[in-house]
Amino acid sequence: MPEDMFVEEVRGVWHALQPGDVLANFFPAGRSWPTHAFYNRLAARCGASALPVGDLQDGQFDRWLTFCEEYGVNAIAAPPSVVRQLLRRYGGSGRPPWWLRKLLIGGAFHDPTPEREIAHRLPGVQVWQLYGSAEAWMVGHRGPGCEEDVFHLLPHQYAEIDGDRILVTTTEVHRAPPLIRYLIGDRGAPADCCCGRSGRALRVLGPIEPSVVFQGHPIWARELVDLALENRDVTAAQVVVIPSGGDDEHLELRVCLADGVPDDQYTREWIRYQVLSGHLALDPAIAEHSESFQVVAVDRLHAGAHEEPPLLVTERVE
Ligand SMILES: [Zn+2]
């Protein structure tokens, strides 16, 4: 990633921030979330101010919203988990915050939050969205008046559709190693946008394989399952997303153990360690001390509609 994080290329076409705007940046800070640094730099380059909130502690969200109001914030940049909190907070009887004019979502990933839900719960708030991946970085952008899930390509990104898979090539700018026909992991289709902006646009249809955003990266369920199966103690595995109601999803790697393998802490920690250290995008140092990734031994995996248990299941909280 070049030092400037392609901020100029994004700023030139995506006019989410203006001089005088005050952006509260709710993307978690730290190495695994460069999107936080990106939004801070974008604000600075646009002549706006950034309030780098970073990681939210449990129960702190309302205090931060009050703080935002007092300090003249008019825009929020937030990852999907915080967007969900915001929508929950202002669902039903809660009146949307009068000071919030813009919501900046997405980044080096795809935020699938339905736009109609944002429009319903936060009426009058402009939605500005970026799309990309950890490796390709920002690829496309959309703004108020654009069709849902349709992204205009950034000028330095070229995208092809192969079957329904999106391939991205980064052009014009220096980047090493070069990114050529990179399989971004989402399905897509060429699209026209009703906003009338010229240039190429694509519709993002969702991930090729079941995935979940964890520590700021899309994680393919298959990767975690395959890593678990490399351990001979494991005969079957499945990733379960447990909405925590808090800032971050909890991931459970559910495993069936081979005959005679005891279900004890040693076994579970050993599987967890092997999966984390074998995965390229996960940061073992963070994940290891985090409660949000657990290995759980089960007798039977969640069954799916098909014969094979699905790789990824989202558990409902009653
Ligand atoms: Zn558009």
Image: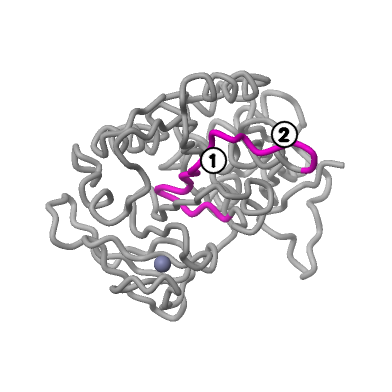
Q: Give how far across and how far down residue 39 sits, in percent.
A: 36, 37
From the viewer's perspective, is residue 314 above or below residue 308? above
Q: Give how far across and how far down residue 91 sits, in percent.
A: 74, 42
- Is 118 or 224 nearer to us in this picture? 118
Residue drawn at (72%, 53%) of the image: 313
From the viewer's perspective, is residue 282 above or below residue 236? above
Q: Is residue 255 left or right of residue 280?
A: right
Q: Give how far across and how far down residue 79 sits, in percent.
A: 52, 40
Q: Give how far across and how far down residue 57 sits, in percent.
A: 60, 20
Task: Find disc 2 in the rendering and name its residue.
Answer: 245
Task: Find disc 1 in the rendering and name its residue.
Answer: 214
> Can you name the residue that lies furthest to the front here?
98
Residue drawn at (57%, 56%) of the image: 112
Residue drawn at (65%, 23%) of the image: 62
* Label 1 residue SS: strand
* Label 2 residue SS: loop
Q: Whereabouts is ligand 1, in terms of quadrant?
A: bottom left
Amino acid type for the residue under numbered disc 2: Gly
- Is 295 or 136 nearer to us in this picture? 136
Magenta region, residue range: 92-112
